Structure formats: structure tokens, C-alpha cells
Image: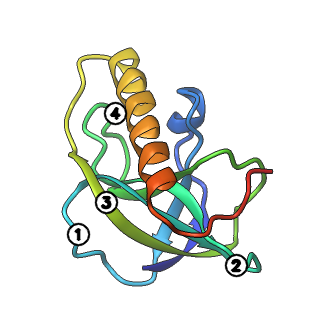
Amino acid sequence: MNGLIEHGKGLGRTLGFPTANIRADVESDCENGVYAGAIWVEFEPLPRPAMINQGTHPTAPEGKPTIEAYILDYQGDLYGQRVRVEYLKWLRPERRFESLDALKAQLARDVEATRAWAALSGMEWMSAE
């Protein structure tokens, strides 16, 4: 899927997992949930590993459904840039958590699962900045 990075509601940043919110060019037909995947940022030659969430964010449901990516070890401003996203490994379905702390703990586990997948994937990744 291709899309443009736009501002979201900032919850990921508050939880310690800043995400790139992607306004997709076409609607995704993938199931809502969390995936390990790859994101290609325009003007960069290699993909970066990312934890991708697609869904309605049931723990904090304000706003429209989103596609967002936490790019592992990325520091920088992506607003207004185009990206290509590939969902490569299903991690878990979307679900509601009893608190933001419980969501944060699960996100940490999801990031570790994404790191493990990226390490085993055999893809050539952009190095951390």
C-alpha cells in the first residue's frame, strides 16, 4: 500500500511508540490488527522494519480508523512524505485493553516480536540512525 504521512492524535508518542499515520491511496483489504512489516520512505533506498497497526483503536476510539506504523529505531520527521507499506507477518488481532498501561505493555511485546521477525527475515534493512 502507498500513502502519505499525516498527523494523528499523538497517542502513540504519548505511550512511547510514535507512529507514522498513513493516509492510504486506496483502502486496505487486510484484516484489522497488528503486523510486522516493512516501510519504504521516499528517497531512501532500503526499507525499514515496522510494527504496523490497522484498525479502529478500541482502547482509545476517538477519531477515524487508521493505518499507522512504528518504525523501529527511527528518529526524524516524516510528515508529508510518501511511503510504501507492506504487511509481512500477522502478529495479533486488534483488541481493547483495560488501560493505556496495558496497551503500552502489549505494544512493547509487539515491538519485540517485530524485531525478532526482522532479524530472521533475511531482508536487507536500512540501518538505524
Give the CA distance from mark 4 to mark 2.
30 Å
Residues packed near mark 4 inside 10 Å, few (<14), some (14 to 19) or many (20 plus): few
Please state which amino acid type lies under the numbered disc 1. Cys
Q: Does 43 sit above or below residue 52?
A: below
Identify the residue position indicated by label 3 in the image: 89
At x 76%, y 47%, the residue is 75
Q: Secondary structure at mark 3?
A: strand
Q: Residue at x 19, y 37 (%)?
A: 95
Which residue is under mark 1? 30
- Please give the residue where the numbered disc 4 appears in the rendered image: 60
What amino acid does circle 2 point to? Glu
Q: Residues under labels 1 and 3: Cα distance? A: 12 Å
Secondary element under disc 1, as helix, strand or loop, is loop
Disc 4 marks which amino acid?
A: Ala
Q: Mark 1 touching mark 3, by CB under 8 A?
A: no
Classify mark 1: residues with Cα within 10 Å, few (<14), some (14-19) or many (20+): few
